Image (cartoon, rainbow, N blue to C red):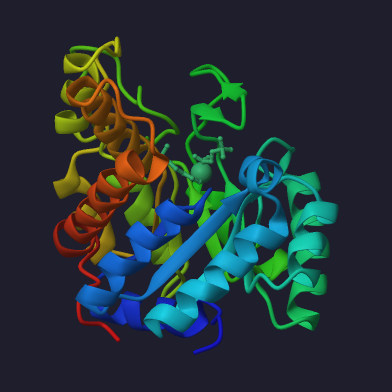
Amino acid sequence: MPLVTSTELFKKAYDGNYAIGAFNVNNMEIIQGITEAAKELRSPLILQVSAGARKYAKHVYLVKLVEAALEDTDLPIVLHLDHGDSFEICKSCIDGGFTSVMIDGSHHNFKDNVALTKKVVEYAHAHGVVVEGELGRLEGIEDDVKVSAEDASYTDPAEVQEFVESTGVDSLAIAIGTSHGAYKFKPGQKPQLRFDILKDVSKRLPGFPIVLHGASSVIPEFVRMINQFGGNMPDAIGIPEDMLREAAKLSVCKINIDSDLRLALTATIRKYFAENPSHFDPRHYLSPAREAIKNMVAHKIKAVLGSENRI
Ligand code: G3H
Ligand code: 13P
Ligand code: ZN
């Protein structure tokens, strides 16, 4: 099966009260772990690539690895640019085989965000590619850029209709209290999401797919493992799974997960070396890491996304 866009996947997800997992990919083992889980559970998938991932692995390697996964699994897969911050990077991914791009104009004012997003939409749609825009700003770290709590801002529901209508975007990322990275809430703080904002946005955009970034749960088992096997992570708190499941039943059709992949991989490799200090064959420590990713993604598909058996 060739790569697909998210149009049909989101329509079904919206109507079926579930969400599609958008997992960040950086290398072969991560792609294999994610796609093997989705294949076994017959779940559609979004594989997303950040600017940092393209820099690390090179665009062509990631595209070819995803093409290999398509051949191996026959799944409906979307290849998506995560957090494109300029027209040029979006164009490069559109020209280079992606079926979906995000233009993240959330660091601009409303007017400039609209203008940039509209420009990307025009180019993308002319090439059969769909576009995710963003309104509101998430706290946290992406690609070494740190957005502080003061600079973060919730999405203003009063702006969403005008943004979607004047840009023509196909989906919209909103800020309701999720954030990037492993430290989403302060120790002792009770995780909370602004479901009132989500519901208000959905009312203003009936049937329109909403995206949640920063949606890792920062699975405590992996944080514990990292600290048990030589790491030193301070208290890390993520988004509770039941809140994400709730959002997936509403208008949220895409849930972004990267930190949980990183934690699964790192925790497993740390454990492996603690137990096998003299080993040095990468296949030996990457095999259990890939398996841990597969199990973690299978868990997300079943318990968080609700996307099992949706093909
Ligand atoms: O939201 C950002 C993703 O976790 C990607 O992170 O920019 O370090 O690849 P990255
Ligand atoms: P996490 O850091 O919560 O995994 O978020 C990932 C993300 O939003 C990628 O765009
Ligand atoms: Zn993100």
Q: Position of residue 238 (x, y in %)?
A: 27, 32
Q: So how many labels did they put on this image? A: 0
Q: Is residue 78 above or below residue 29?
A: below
Q: At 53% from the left edge and 27% from the top edge, which residue is drawn?
A: 141
Q: Position of residue 271 (x, y in %)?
A: 21, 27
Q: Is residue 180 visible?
A: yes
Q: Is residue 211 visible?
A: no
- 266 sits left or right of 147 in the view: left
- 21 sits left or right of 227 in the view: right
Assign ligand 1 to one image quadrant: top right
- 53 sits left or right of 9 in the view: right
Q: At 23% from the left edge and 47% from the top edge, which residue is drawn?
A: 292
Q: Position of residue 212 (x, y in %)?
A: 41, 51
Residue 275's image quarter? Answer: top left
Q: Is residue 49 above or below residue 47?
A: above
Q: Is residue 244 above or below residue 148?
A: below
Q: Looking at the image, which residue sits at the far bottom?
A: 1
Q: Position of residue 134 (x, y in %)?
A: 59, 50
Q: Looking at the image, which residue sits at the far front?
A: 278
Q: At 59% from the left edge and 71% from the top edge, which residue is drawn?
A: 170
Q: Nearer the viewer, residue 237 or 25?
A: 25
Residue 215's image quarter? Answer: top left
Q: Where's the C terminus, which quadrant?
A: bottom left
Q: Nearer the viewer, residue 11 or 226?
A: 226
Residue 67's image quarter? Answer: bottom right
- 181 sits left or right of 294 in the view: right
Q: At 70% from the left edge and 57% from the top edge, which residue is drawn?
A: 59
